[in-house]
């Protein structure tokens, strides 16, 4: 899904994955729109858009995506780090990461829903470690560290517990 932004001159532009497009024409049936890369002198890329979604791409870009794409990638990296390192609520976390970003960067970012999924996926992969045990009886080993056969794979077991301890520190 791309998004529409207004240029400084008030012209509408379509932005997708760091590439900016200028409006070309509406299809004969009046349903879809044709947009062409804003660097049309050097690039022949075009897209066909329906309700903000690209339904067809024609030609590939002859150049790199814009700085906004790079900025957006940076936001995503930050988001993933915070997801791993904090216990902030998902919405709060996303808001903190997207604050003060440019309009063009917003256009290069995935939707809010997609960002939420990204945070959740990242957190699921890490698995929260339970509270510190008081004694051996209360030591809880998370399921993700139990996927081994202790007798057959002593070494892996030790590694798993070591990584658990590392994570806690
Ligand atoms: Zn292009």
Image (cartoon, rainbow, N blue to C red):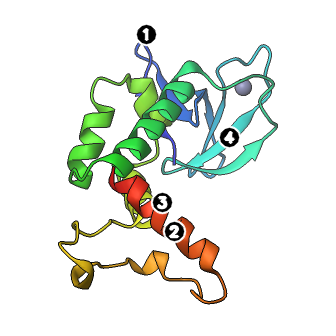
Q: Earlier in the sequence, mark 1 or mark 4?
A: 1
Residue at (32, 34) in percent of width and height: 98
Residue 158: % across, % down = 54, 70
Horizontal side of 20 relative to 168 (left or right) equals: right
CB at mark 1 closer than 8 A to ligand 1? no
Q: Secondary structure at mark 4?
A: strand
Q: Earlier in the sequence, mark 4 or mark 2?
A: 4
The mark total stands at: 4
CB at mark 2 closer than 8 A to ligand 1? no
The tag on residue 47 is 4
Cα separation, mark 2 vs mark 1, equals 57 Å
Residue at (48, 38) in percent of width and height: 77
Task: Find disc 1 in the rendering and name its residue.
Answer: 9
Task: Find disc 2 in the rendering and name its residue.
Answer: 160
Residue at (58, 30) in percent of width and height: 18
Cα separation, mark 4 vs mark 2, equals 48 Å
Q: Nearer the viewer, mark 3 or mark 4?
A: 3
Estimate how packed mark 2 is, as few (under 14), some (14 to 19) or many (20 or more) residues with alpha carbons within 10 Å: some
The tag on residue 163 is 3
Cα separation, mark 3 vs mark 2, equals 5 Å
Q: Is residue 108 above or below residue 119?
A: above
Cα separation, mark 3 vs mark 4, equals 47 Å
Say which quarter of the image contains residue 39.
top right
Cα separation, mark 1 vs mark 4, equals 22 Å
Say which quarter of the image contains residue 10.
top left
Q: Secondary structure at mark 1?
A: loop
Horizontal side of 96 relative to 66 (left or right) equals: left
The tag on residue 137 is none
- The answer to whether the residue labelled 3 contacts the one labelled 2, judged by CB atoms less than 8 Å apart, is yes
């Amino acid at each position: 899904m791309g998004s529409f932004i207004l240029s400084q001159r008030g012209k509408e532009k379509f932005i997708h994955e760091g590439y900016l497009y200028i409006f070309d024409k509406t299809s004969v049936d009046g349903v879809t729109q044709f947009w062409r890369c804003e660097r049309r002198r050097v690039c022949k890329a075009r897209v066909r858009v329906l309700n903000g979604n690209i339904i067809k791409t024609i030609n590939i870009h002859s150049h790199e995506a814009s700085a906004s794409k790079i900025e957006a990638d940076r936001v995503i990296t930050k988001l993933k780090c915070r997801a791993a390192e904090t216990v902030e609520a998902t919405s709060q976390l996303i808001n903190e990461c997207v604050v003060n970003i440019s309009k063009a960067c917003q256009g290069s970012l995935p939707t809010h829903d997609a960002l939420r999924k990204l945070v959740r996926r990242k957190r699921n992969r890490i698995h929260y470690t339970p509270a510190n045990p008081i004694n051996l009886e209360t030591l809880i080993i998370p399921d993700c560290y139990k996927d081994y056969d202790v007798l057959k794979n002593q070494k892996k077991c030790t590694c798993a517990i070591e990584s658990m301890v590392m994570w806690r520190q």
